Amino acid sequence: MTLRTRFAPSPTGYLHIGGARTALFSWLHARKHGGRFILRIEDTDLERSTAESVNAILEGMTWLGLEYDEGPFYQTHRFDRYKEVVQQLLARGEAYHCYCSKEELEAMREEQMANKQKPRYDGRCRQRKTPREGVAPVVRFKNPTEGAVVVDDKVRGRVVFQNSELDDLIIARSDGSPTYNLSVVVDDYDMAITHVIRGDDHLNNTPRQINIFRALGAEPPVYAHVPMILAEDGAKLSKRHGAASVMDYREQGFLPEALLNYLVRLGWSHGDQEIFTTEEMIALFAVENINNSASALNHGKLLWLNQHYIKTASPEHIARHLSYHLGKLGIDPSTGPALVEVVKAQQERAKTLVEMAENSVFFYRDFERFDESAAKKNLKAEARAALEFLHEKIKTLTEWAPEPIHQVINETAEQLGLKLGKVAQPLRVAVTGGSVSPPIDVTVYLIGPGKTLARLEKAIEYISLADG
């Protein structure tokens, strides 16, 4: 039998970071065992599900590189199938119509709570033979009243639920639409899902779903319930903690492979290894090694991983992602130096792609003013001669490359009797507007001869005005 996993998000918001980890674990399990990974959109909540949320999920999966083998399947396209299964369960006596009103159910709960009992449906319509006039009934699953459901969970271990603790859940609403526990079982059954990896907030649903599987004469899948991800302060993760969605991390300048590497280590480990290629993740991942306690985010560690991937990935790969962030700054990368060359110059200097993009603006766009502190320190009267000398030398260069530019800077220092820093730093401020850049010969080379000469002239004018 082919192993089959699935990721089944509800499209009621963005792709949450916890959902992305669940998708990753499911994807890795399928890839390791030569299985199939299915994407299913659980959109039966018609009031809250939106097309924008579906797009956000698909965009997040694509950006992370978690390609699916089948799907996306939409539950809203399968309503006829769910109704068919409900009718089968009714015909077999495994389900029944419930005519209880909201008022009756509320009174029942209040009485149970007054008697210090667990609030639950008491099965009063189980034996009802006649309909109630003018009432559209729901359909309830007739849960077994004896015995126990044993879940051999791959993360939590053996978990036992007594059937006497489970009430008869609603599987179809009064309008005929299916509820979550019915539709998820039908989908997993029809799609031949063998392994379900999901958040442990679903653990209490599992015995109910197993009982529905058995009522259908089907074998339930293997379950693995993964603990939640907490914020750094130990609280439940929310928007107030910063990035909560996958695409938030993209906006903050993280690489997808850095985020995947970070997510796989939230609750799973392989010895002391911290950095994993995708191939290593697939080869080493084992569901049984997922930790059964919650994991907390660590932004510093994610930054460290991101910096590692920025430093070690191919410049071409970084350039593809950096282009997006330059575009957000209103820069068309085709209007300046080759983006791959800019990446090579900046790769050792940035923790995020946002930082790299912001630090690369001067390669593509002229700055309006010099950084005040940098200009005050470096664009002083004594720097004027060096900048004028550089201007004349650069103007006569026949080969535009870092090495000839480096020679010009050295010659300027020698002929004017200056230390190299007294030439290189004023030049850096002149051509970038600030005091920080890649090596000055590479910086000038990437800026290009025309812009370099124009910016030198601007700096010389700045010194003249300040001196005058």
Image: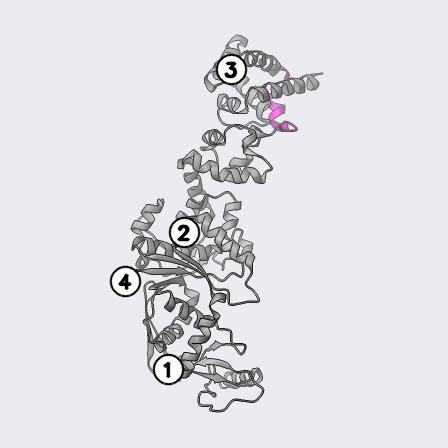
> Cα distance, mark 4 to mark 1?
30 Å
The residue most toward the top is 415
**Tag 4 secondary structure:** loop
N-terminal of the pair, mark 2 or mark 4, is: 4
To which residue does mark 4 refer?
A: 1
Category of crowding for the residue at label 4, using alpha-carbon neighbours closer than 10 angstroms: few (below 14), some (14–19), many (at least 20): few
N-terminal of the pair, mark 1 or mark 3, is: 1
Whether residue 150 is situated above or below residue 247 in the rendered picture:
below
To which residue does mark 3 refer?
A: 409
Could you tell me which quadrant the C terminus lies in? top right
Q: Which residues are magenta?
A: 368-381
The residue most toward the left is 1
To which residue does mark 1 refer?
A: 144
Front tag of 4 and 1: 4
Residue at 48% x, 72% y: name it: 179
Residue at 44% x, 35% y: name it: 316
> Cα distance, mark 1 to mark 3?
86 Å
Residue 124 highlighted magenta (yes or no): no
Residue at 49% x, 62% y: name it: 10
To which residue does mark 2 refer?
A: 67
